[in-house]
Image (cartoon, rainbow, N blue to C red):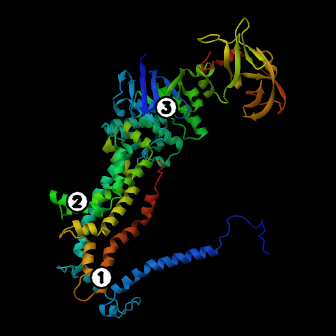
Amino acid sequence: MTNGVSIRDLSLSFGSLSVIDTLNIDIQEGEFLVLLGPSGCGKSTLLNVIAGLLEATDGEVWISGRNVTWEEPKDRGIGMVFQSYALYPQMTVEKNLSFGLQVSGMAKPEISKRVARAAEVLQIEPLLKRRPGALSGGQRQRVAIGRALVRDVDVFLFDEPLSNLDAKLRAELRVEIKRLHQKLSNTMIYVTHDQIEAMTLADRIAIMKGGVLQQLDTPQTIYSRPANRFVAGFIGSPGMNFLNAELEAGADPAFKVGASRIPAAGYSFDGLGLVAGPVTFGVRPEHVAAGEQAEKLPFVTDVPIEVIEPMGADTLVWSRFEGQEFTFRIDSEHTYRVGDQVRIGFDPARASVFDASGNRL
Amino acid sequence: MTQTNPAVARGRKPKKMSPARYGLYGLLVISATFFLTPLYVMIVTSLKPLEEVRLGRLFSLPADITFDAWIKAWSTACTGVTCAGISPGFVNSVQITVVSVLISVLLGAVNGYALSFWRYRGANVLFGILVMGAFVPFQAVIYPLIVFQREIGIFGSLAGIVMVHCIFGMPIITLIFRNYFSSLPEELFKAARIDGAGFWQIFLRIMMPMAVPITAVAVILQTTGIWNDYLLGLVFGGRDNQPMTVQLNNIVTTSYGVREYNVNMAATILTAAVPLVIYFLSGRFFVQGIAAGAVKG
């Protein structure tokens, strides 16, 4: 399979401020890649460089097997959808869709054919004669996607397209974008800071921080085997519990948290293997069981309940384990009260352990 | 003791005229009177025959209304050696204003657009220099400009006076347009670039249609500014392109014969009429344009 988009040794700096630092990403043709990270991590900047709206300081951008580093945005075979929709307010939806084609000097019948097709795919036919001002947020974003669609491009770039929408619409359009990808199977690069969007849409997620790629993998791997502490803390809501622990080697290796010993036998170590010393032991709230279900797990303990947060589908419990803050999810049908001691248990095999510098062990 | 029953409080709270309100309205009436009195005097004086003016009853209404002063001011009053009234000045002013406004607003719009979207190297320095230009008193550069125009042979011509107005209008118009364009979402510009539009296509097809309110502001500012200009018209207009303001001055300061106050008043009103009419017709538009900061797409 050929690469849809390749980023090779890409760097970008504004003066002395480095925004992207020698980045390498290969995106396969037809892949849905999500760039995820906190604001200011360089993900939108990277998208702008791919689009040709910003010049790279160093490195190359390849799209569909062509080096487009010096090409104009229009010649790169990309379409882009923006957070603020960026529709031309004085033009009707139809004009918005056809503007790019008109500029490129395409024949009229071909333009109307393409506009009609895009309108059909996105189900915006009844809106064609309206102006953007008369549309709702969701409709506007659909038109914005249509503007990329009519240009028949190889690569779609999405710059936080759903951030301006309310929660319900966001969920709806998320599914629509996924459907669109399944139908068109174009390469899509999608920038977001929303981990739900990233998890649900992506074939692979690239997590960035400070212009540096932290991990590039499938959503499931990123969730269950985060490469470092930053990724572990960024993915998952509520966040992973991090416990300061001491890794003990020997015949019966264990993570010592305060007076408790969590057996390390079930944990599969990466790369460096088992190295004794101070570590961070991470376990997700949803991987902790409470009550009877806890009994059969490799590690069991009792903790006091400090705060109970009912979420509807489940309930989040805040407690303390060996003096360190510890949260876990329980079924919303429960009888616990604040102050109760509750039996919890978890399996170290599902945990993530990081060394002092934050890398996964 | 009066105490309002809380059970009565329901719906919109009744409005009451407080002493502060009376004071405010009083002040407004007084300031309006202050500014309108001269206008009143001008209008009534211009409608009186000269004999009645001489009586010195400044505020009295005209006994018999006559438009002779207006006709004379327009077509026969002497402006120096020629006695064709103020109408040639009107024609000159229209010519100067229309051409200057068109060119200066167009240049300012292109400048502002380029400065806010095409961030080329040195754009900020250029903008700084342009803004500084707005603070240079034009009296200081008049002489060098005269010499420059003489050398290129356009001093005293229509082209000369238009060029001067464009130069002096440039900083403020550029500033207005740059600030307006900066308030537009940059993503709009990016979208247009991805659509393949170039510098002029984005300017003419995307940006200018969105800039109608601010263009109106710029046109109004420039029109009134150029129309009301006296010094530049006097210096650069030459003999053939004297604007209305210069001719008005010539009528009023004629130092021989009788002082025809009614003619002077009529000529003054005629000269001031154009900017006044523009303000009346477009006042609301002007305020809207000034207030148009964030454009919701």
Q: Are marks 1 and 2 in contact (CB under 8 Å)?
A: no
Instruction: Please check whether the numbered discs 1 and 3 fall on a single chain.
Output: no
Mark sitting on residue B144 = 2
The residue that appears at 34% across and 35% down in the rendered structure is: A110
Q: Which of B282 and A228 is in front in this view?
A: A228
Quote the CA–CA distance across marks 1 and 3.
69 Å
Mark 3, Cα crowd under 10 Å, few <14 / some 14-19 / many 20+, is many
- Name the quarter where the N terminus of chain B is drawn: bottom right
Q: Nearer the viewer, residue B63 or B96?
A: B96
**Which chain contains the residue that carries disc 2?**
B
Q: What residue type is labelled 2?
A: Pro
Number of numbered labels in the structure image: 3
* A117 lies above or below A303: below
**Which chain contains the residue that carries disc 3?**
A
Mark sitting on residue B264 = 1
Local SS, label 3: loop
Mark sitting on residue A213 = none
Local SS, label 1: helix
Mark 2, Cα crowd under 10 Å, few <14 / some 14-19 / many 20+, is few
Q: Where is residue A302 in the image (x, y as percent from the top left)?
A: 82, 22
Image-based side of A42 in relation to A56, left or right: right
The residue pinned by badge 3 equals A42
**Which chain contains the residue that carries disc 1?**
B
Q: Position of residue B283 (x, y in %)?
A: 42, 66
